[in-house]
Image (cartoon, coloured by chain):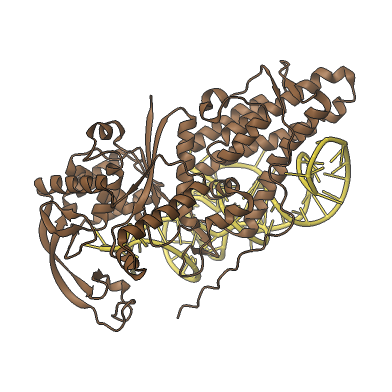
Amino acid sequence: MARFYLTTAIDYVNSRPHLGTAYEKITADVIARYKRLCGIDTHFVMGNDEHSQNVFRRAIELGLDPHEYCNQMENEFREVWGKLGISFNDFIRTTESRHKAAVQKIAETSFQVGDIYEGYYEGWYCISCEAFKQEKDLVEGKCPLHAMLSPEWIREKNYFFKLSKYRERLLAHFEQNPNFLQPSSRANEIVQLLRGGLEDISVSRAGQSWGIPLPFASDNVVYVWFDALINYASAVGYGTDGERFTSLWPADLHIVGKDITRFHAVVWPAMLMSAGLALPRQVFGHGWVTFGGQRMSKSLGSSVDPIEVSEHFGSDPLRLYLVKEIVYGNDGEFTWDRYIERYNVDLANNLGNLLSRLAAMVAKYSDGRVSASGASGKLPKVASEVLIRYKAGMEALALHEGAAAVFQLVDATNEFIAETSPWVLAKQPENAAKLASVLFDVAEALRIIGVLLIPIMPSASAEILRRVGETTPLHDLKLDDDGCWRASGSRNIVAASPLWPRANNPIIQPEINESKEKS
RNA sequence: GCCGGAGUAGCUCAGCCGGUUAGAGCGUACGUCUCAUAAGCGUAAGGUCGGUGGUUCGAGUCCACCCUCCGGCACCA
């Protein structure tokens, strides 16, 4: 059986996830569910990144043991992902022993082949933070968190990874695998970077307790990327379950934010080369969800709570909005006005209303049941064209195109009803066969719509399929069979209250904090 | 400063390798059906495609310069 291993970036546990973070998980989930719908054995991994001095400090501030703090954050994250319908198969935390084993194994392997060596790292060091600071992070030469103290220029012995050694191999990989990093504009940036040369990177810090010790130098803990990136391997058994690792590695797709594509497209592949492991097949760098024109950020007051959004209409409309309205790979704006607009148009007026129209007509004209009659109108052809466009979009990670294709079938079905006017046919006994055919076609189009929407709106799809009499359980439906027109059988059509009531009253918008004027 | 991206109808955006009257959705105006969630369907108005100058038989689509906005420029997840 074909398999697909998909990951998102693991998240820093500094606060509850905002809509921007949720966007990444939702789009990845759409891909995962799409692959499953295609009958592919899909393994979808997410997780939390817990080793960081910031996390450690935050826990201390709250008077918590860091592990305890991370446990609490895990629960919060899991709760949000659960409410958004994220169907991950595994959730990895970097403090888990399986992760520690993998990091140490890769570090050891890399060390053995001579890719990790002792060196000196220099920089501004804030004593209170117990961490090095970048020049750009300092405000007037001071640590923004501890402005009372002047940072010190410190030279520390730690370990470096020979990133520079892999420059040519990485360049060759980019040349030979033009789809390795998407969107392609990102790949161009990376190639430029590689041509310009690579510097070795520091991969450890001395004198810290919160982290994974280097196996060959236990007074050093592994630093940031050399820890976090390895989650993709540790989650599938590297260092703990070789058989499992062999069956799942390499990853087919890493979904990450565009800001960290470099680490996934340069550092991570180099680490894998050093450890003698295969590279992931593809990395996709998505854009930001902006709010008020700005990237979501708690400190700027430009963040939106995904749970708050989903409490209005449910998680499905939010998922649809994010997938359909934002070109995957580009930035996209979230506004409450536009969100409500799309909800009303796509879901209340078009798809939801279509479902109601069908149910009412079938109840009135056909005793709640539709049967295939042989002759069909234009919908089978439209449906097959839509299926092709849908698949093309999803396969190419143009998720917005896949989603848009489904709604082309919704539109065509509403048009078809207007063109055939079943209410007129119903008054003409001689047109009974025609009427039956029209009603069946509409029901069948809706059934296909329900199937195609499974990855995007899983809960709503289940309800749509129930109402149009699809009896196969959701997880048994397969795109290549059930996404095609079925010109046979008869089905009960369930009449029920509107799936998405029109939102006529404006939502009371949550207070938007004015972003502070930056001086 | 360097590199890259973007600037197309009121709004949000499509426009691949240059080719007939520049597209979609929403919004607006008008018309229309009545099965439906005052939803559906149809028609129309609306754009000198950031600016200037080029290449070309022909440019939103290529080139140069300029203006505006955004991102990246490496140890920050």
B7, A456: nearer the viewer: A456
Q: Using residue A430 as the reference point, say whether residue A222 is left or right of it.
A: left
Looking at the picture, does residue A222 appear above or below residue A487?
Answer: below
Quarter occupied by the N terminus of chain A: top left
Q: Using residue A79 as the reference point, say whether residue A48 is left or right of it.
A: left
A233, B23: nearer the viewer: A233
Looking at the picture, does residue A451 appear above or below residue A291?
Answer: above
Q: Using residue A93 as the reference point, say whether residue A459 is left or right of it.
A: right
Quarter occupied by the C terminus of chain A: bottom left
Chain shaded yellow: B
* Residue at 56 percent of width and 39 percent of height: A458
Quadrant hosting residue A62: bottom left
Whole-percent x and y of residue A250?
29, 37
Callout count: 0
Whole-percent x and y of residue B40?
76, 41
Residue A399 seen:
yes
Looking at the picture, does residue A317 appear above or below residue A247?
Answer: below
Q: Using residue A261 as the reference point, say whether residue B52 is left or right of it.
A: right
Whole-percent x and y of residue A39?
46, 27
Residue A194 seen:
no
Quadrant hosting residue A258: bottom left
Looking at the picture, does residue A108 appear above or below residue B75?
Answer: above
- Pick out the residue farthest to the bottom: A148
* Residue at 41 percent of width and 47 percent of height: A183
* Residue at 22 percent of width and 45 percent of height: A102
Whole-percent x and y of residue B8?
60, 57
* Residue at 60 percent of width and 68 percent of height: A511
Q: Colour of chain A?
A: brown
